[in-house]
Amino acid sequence: MLKHFAIVPVVLCLSIALALLPAKDFQQMFFASEPVDTPWLITLAMAFAFFLVVWFLLSCGYVFSIFRRTLAYHKNIRLIYADESGRKLNWVIITSALMILTWVYALVVLALENRLAHLGISETGVLGLLSLIVWLVAHNGIKQQTGFGETTEANTEIAHVIKAQAYERSALRKKDLQRIAAKIETAVAQDQIHLESDLNLVKLAKHIAEPPQYISQTLSQHLNTTFFDFINKARIDDARQLLATTDHSVLDIAYATGFNSRSAFYKAFKNYLNQTPSEYRANCP
């Protein structure tokens, strides 16, 4: 982590130098229309401009990394869990986008000063956007669930799955993939393991006595799916049958088929069948 703070001592020295400037020199550097004319002030002005550009480039790099890592994290969640509720980090992407908007807004205010104040574009707006960013981070950060909140042993297995997913895996032969696929399908069709609301890849692995990374590889390479999609597809198939043959409420069916909430059930159902559970039931013969 130290590399991320390498620039801090240099910028801190620059900040101290600027803070110790006489008021007249400070005014000339930042607010006067005449250019600075002494070697020391010219040096400080060039250093300030240089690190401003560096800050902008670093900030863009960090925001890009946030987007990339968040998308990879969401992909990894689907390798391990059948329920994304409370684990997704969409608010991080939204906050990052808001940061970019704040930078652009601040640049407009800096360039045009108060010429757009009649449209509500001013320094007050910058402070408002910054306050909103702080509130979003604090509010969502407090209630965010741990992505991979398992035991140490389970987290080790999860790490192996994610690492294996990042490379072309060739540990299993075709007959091994077929054997594990049969065990997975038996666990769903006969043991009804998909109805467990807290099911994850590690629990399925223990149920069929196979390493989690082998199950993930089988789902990906042999069945062309992910753990998330495979389990939720099985749940939706059961839900369709219950909707067509019983008068149970949609919420009861959602819980009976392994979903943890009505919203998760509706989202999955709409994703697989392009209609809501109520619409499906209404169209059943």
Image: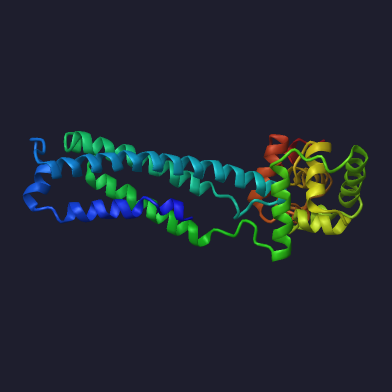
* Whether residue 151 is visible: no
Residue nearest the viewer, comparing 196 with 14: 14
Q: Is residue 254 above or below residue 230?
A: below
Residue nearest the viewer, comparing 3 with 69: 3
Q: Residue at x 23, y 38 (%)?
A: 109
List x then y, in percent, for residue 225.
77, 39
List x then y, in percent, for residue 112.
20, 34
Quadrant in which the C terminus appears: top right
Q: In the rendered image, which quarter is residue 99 located in?
A: top left
List x then y, in percent, for residue 73.
61, 47
Q: Is residue 262 above or below residue 102?
A: below
- Count of numbered labels shown in the rendering: 0
From the viewer's perspective, tell me whether residue 135 is left or right of residue 120: right
* Whether residue 44 is visible: yes
Q: Residue at x 79, y 52 (%)?
A: 212
From the viewer's perspective, tell me whether residue 233 is left or right of residue 2: right
From the viewer's perspective, tell me whether residue 37 is left or right of residue 67: left
List x then y, in percent, for residue 25.
9, 47
From the viewer's perspective, tell me whether residue 266 is left or right of residue 181: left
Q: Residue at x 54, y 58 (%)?
A: 144
Q: Residue at x 32, y 37 (%)?
A: 104
Q: In the rendered image, which quarter is residue 240 located in?
A: top right
- Which residue extends farthest front? 39
The colour scheme is rainbow
